[in-house]
Amino acid sequence: MHALRHFCASVLLDAGESIKVLSEYLGHHDPGFTLRTYTHLMPSSGTRTRAAVDRVFADGNPRPGHGPGECLAV
């Protein structure tokens, strides 16, 4: 059962599910615990991040409010 639990978590993380939602699915009260426990299952997250940024700037004309400076603005 433990292996099945890890398999399920890895499939959901690879599909892009959020840590918060995965934490709820697994019955963890702290998403930080889930992140610390399953972070090794997220090797493709860097690839997904780069692809998301590439999609935004692919047309050479990013949408207003979605430039590099705006994404971190508070």
Image: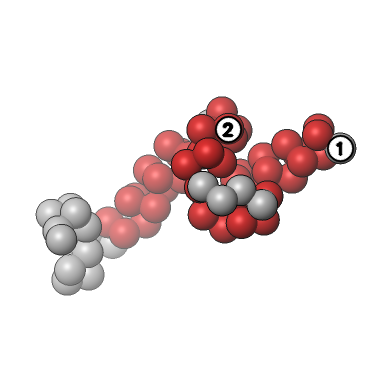
In the foreground, 67 or 5: 5
Kindly check if marks 2 and 1 are in contact, taking CB atoms under 8 A apart as contact. no
Point out residue 53 in the picture as x, y percentages from the top left corner.
33, 51
Compared to 61, does 72 lie above or below? above
Residue 8 x %, y %: 74, 45
| Residue at image coords 15%, 61% | 74
Name the residue furthest front.
29
The numbered disc on residue 73 is: none
Secondary structure found at label 2 = helix
The x and y percentages for residue 38 are 59, 35
Q: Tell me the number on the disc at residue 37.
A: 2
Report the residue that reaches farthest toward the right: 1
As displayed, is residue 31 above or below residue 42? below
Residue reaching furthest to the top: 40
Residue 3 placement, left or right of 47: right
Residue type pointed to by label 2: Thr
Q: Amino acid at mark 1?
A: Met
44, 23: nearer the viewer = 23
Residue occupying image coordinates x 51% and y 47%: 30
Q: Residue at x 56, y 28 (%)?
A: 40
Residue 49 visible at all:
yes
Which residue is label 1 attached to? 1
Q: Residue 18: tell me if it is visible.
A: no
- Number of disc labels: 2
Residue 17 lies, with reference to residue 35, above or below; the image says below
Q: How much space separates mark 2 and mark 1, taking CA atoms?
A: 16 Å
**Between 40 and 58, the one nearer to me in the picture:** 40
**Which colour scheme appears in the figure?**
secondary structure
